[in-house]
Amino acid sequence: MDLDTECIPLGHIQTYFDLRKSIVPDVAWLMKKSQINVRNPHELLELIVGIDQHAFYRNAGIDYSPEDSDRFISTRQTLALIDQAVRALEMPFLGLAMGNLMTISHHGMAGVAAVTQPTLRGCLECISRFCAELFPPLEMTPVIDSDEGSFVIAENISLAPYTHFFFELNMVSFYNIMLHLLGGQQMPRRVEFSYPEPAWGHIYRRYFACPVLFNQKQTRIVGDVRLADYELPLANRLMAMAAEKTLFEKIPTRAIRLLPLRLRRLLLRGYGAFPSLEAAASDLGMSGRTLRRKLAEEGTTYQRELDEVRHRLAREYFMRGGESVTELAMLLGFSDSSAFAKAFRRWTGMAPTEFLEGREGVASSEAHPETDPI
């Protein structure tokens, strides 16, 4: 998958950008709901409500039709849509405002399926599954540690210069959904962003009633681990199943057919015990020979995908505070620490010890740069 792979359902993107369906044509309501202050709110409202949808999509190279839900668009085209919106509204923090405008109902059947799961853990796992199919450039993962649970959002490919837009929109939207489901009884402990604080960092704190941290190892919402098993007030298994079925009947997906992405997800689940090529092929419903051939057609190999996953997990291990090269080598399936060190140098251009020594500097340099497109 790259920037030009057409894997994002247009029908899904339309739910984000057709905000006219969820906006009350009233300036006071808009100001209160979006928590923004602008010089000319009437003009802003007119821009949002009166935007020419055909021109908006056409300028991004998309043949637009409101009924054209069977189309797929690329990440590059999606970024072009965001660029237009940010520039037209003169709002570099548009992701925050859009995320706060989105209600559960705005997510359509995906929202219904998520909030009718039995527990918060089930809700977040459902969101993660939908993200994998509806917006594969992003990956969303519920993580349970000893005393904390978190909902992690990460890029599968770079969304620069609008990484912050995607993280802002999803973090605010899912933070609000969690508060709604928890009935205000429990609050997330903090929200963390993996990039430096942008020029509009102070605006973030209007949207989160908890500490907001930047320059962190991951972008995530963090809460008490006991929240994972919190029984949701709208739990209804039959409704959840029906909503998910309706969702994928209305919006076809293509991500499941992106073999390298499927293999990478399978390998990530095998952290500590990666499957062989033959075992992975079996799990993917094909022979080892077929897997090799199909990967070659996609311009990759099993070993290349395995190395990509190992590289990602190694960096995450070190950035989370891990320091044992021997332990990490064993976790990643290397014969010894020497073999791992050789591979790590090939991936990063430095030895593991050098990476550890410069870990803080690496965290800062890898964070996405501030981008003010105005």
Image (cartoon, grey):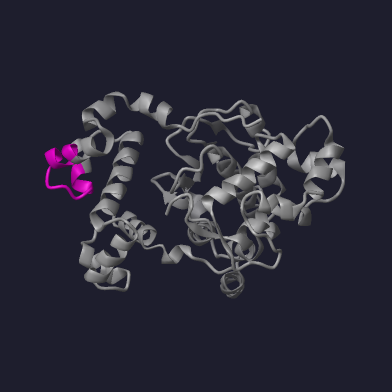
Q: Is residue 116 left or right of residue 362?
A: right
x and y percentages locating residue 261 in the rendered image: 38, 58
Quadrant where the C terminus sits is top right
Which is more toward the observer, 188 or 252?
Answer: 252
Question: Is 338 inside the magenta-drawn segment?
Answer: yes
The reply to whether residue 297 is visible in this rendering is yes
Q: Which residues are magenta?
A: 329-342
Q: Is residue 63 left or right of residue 348?
A: right
Q: Is residue 229 left or right of residue 338?
A: right
Where residue 146 sits, quadrant-wise, is: top left
x and y percentages locating residue 26 in the rendered image: 87, 46
Which is more toward the observer, 372 or 145?
Answer: 372
Q: Residue at x 19, y 50 (%)?
A: 333
Does 115 appear above or below 138? below
Question: Is 362 inside the magenta-drawn segment?
Answer: no
Q: Residue at x 66, y 49 (%)?
A: 59
Q: Residue at x 41, y 27 (%)?
A: 365
